[in-house]
Image: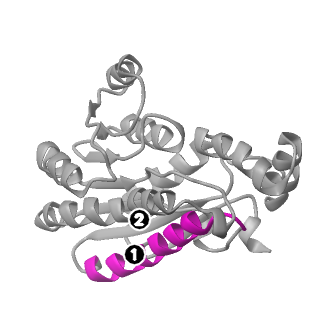
């Protein structure tokens, strides 16, 4: 389905991004990985997927520009890289705010602005932004993340309107809690912020939000990404798809 399409997936060395990269590669796309991790492990992933890799620091606009110039025109852009920090607003480190906004929101602006000219030249493109249930609702102690994801949803709608006559779609996928390193790593901070045990955070904070009482699988998100890249989704743009076990239905 995606033969001869080139796809950049940011934050794709683990978790949701890796699942999306695998799914796109399985459909025939040429994939470029980006993310952190052990060099040997990344080399194995590249071999597995027949993929290239660029380890640009997405919190640096100059590094993003260099990456986009190096990899050349792409047909599919998946802005997936993200980070999280959990703390009460009065204790929230300003440097964490700046980092989260840079990686979760500003990086998507920079990759998109540089990818769009090539997509316009071809008259075809797919921009998929991994948002979050927190693009639609808020949770305490996550001020930067919620602000960034709300911003990403608005950014997606805006570029969808701008690109609607160019054969380019732009959509969000908003997962609930997916069992990934990002979710696992925020458990200790949530334990501290709320004075809870690990089990209480798992059951009373995380899964309490999802009526299905189960974590979303990375493959669930990847399947939606593949669909949004298909010709069947040509008229889907500016949408925000929830995959959250019913969280935002309440």
Marks 1 and 2 sit apart, C-alpha to C-alpha, by 9 Å
Cβ–Cβ under 8 Å for marks 1 and 2? yes
Q: Position of residue 236 (x, y in %)?
A: 43, 72
Question: What residue is at 56 percent from the left and 63 percent from the top?
Answer: 145
Q: Quadrant of the C terminus?
A: bottom right
Q: Badge 1: few (under 14), some or many (20 or more) residues near its Cα, within 10 Å?
A: some
Q: Earlier in the sequence, mark 1 or mark 2?
A: 2
Question: What residue is at 39 percent from the left and 42 percent from the top?
Answer: 24
Question: What residue is at 25 percent from the left and 37 percent from the top?
Answer: 54
Q: Position of residue 14 (x, y in %)?
A: 49, 35
Residue 212 shows in this picture? no
Identify the secondary structure beneath mark 1.
helix
Query: As rendered, which of 217 and 194 lies closer to the eye?
Result: 194
- The label number, if any, that marks residue 105 in the structure image: 2
Identify the secondary structure beneath mark 2.
helix
What's the coloring here? one colour
Residue 188 shows in this picture? yes
Q: Badge 2: few (under 14), some or many (20 or more) residues near its Cα, within 10 Å?
A: many
Of helix, strand and loop, which mostly describes the magenta segment?
Answer: helix
Q: Position of residue 233 (x, y in %)?
A: 42, 65
Give the label, 1 or 2, closer to the camera. Answer: 2
Q: Position of residue 22 (x, y in %)?
A: 44, 35
Q: Is residue 184 found left or right of 51 in the rendered image?
A: right
Q: Which residue is mark 1?
A: 155
Residue range in magenta is 140-163
């Amino acid at each position: 389905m995606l033969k001869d399409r080139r796809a950049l997936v940011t934050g794709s060395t683990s978790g949701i991004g890796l699942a999306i990269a695998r799914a796109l590669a399985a459909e025939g796309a040429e994939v470029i990985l980006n993310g952190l991790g052990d060099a040997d492990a990344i080399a194995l992933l590249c071999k597995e997927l027949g993929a290239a890799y660029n380890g640009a620091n997405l919190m640096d606009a100059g590094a993003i520009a260099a990456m986009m110039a190096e990899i050349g025109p792409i047909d599919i852009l998946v802005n997936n890289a993200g980070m999280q920090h959990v703390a009460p607003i009065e204790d929230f480190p300003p440097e964490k705010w700046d980092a989260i906004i840079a990686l979760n929101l500003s990086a998507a602006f920079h990759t998109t602005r540089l990818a769009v000219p090539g997509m316009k030249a071809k008259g075809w493109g797919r921009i998929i932004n991994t948002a979050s249930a927190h693009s639609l609702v808020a949770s305490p102690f996550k001020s930067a993340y919620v602000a960034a994801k709300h911003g990403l949803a608005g950014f997606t709608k805006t570029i969808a309107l701008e690109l609607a006559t160019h054969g380019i779609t732009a959509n969000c996928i908003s997962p609930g809690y997916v069992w990934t390193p990002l979710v696992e790593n925020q458990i200790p901070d949530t334990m501290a912020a709320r004075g809870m045990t690990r089990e209480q955070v798992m059951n009373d904070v995380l899964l309490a939000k999802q009526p299905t009482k189960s974590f979303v699988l990375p493959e669930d998100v990847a399947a939606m990404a593949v669909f949004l890249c298909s010709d069947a989704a040509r008229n889907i743009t500016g949408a925000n798809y929830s995959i959250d076990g019913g969280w935002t239905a309440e």
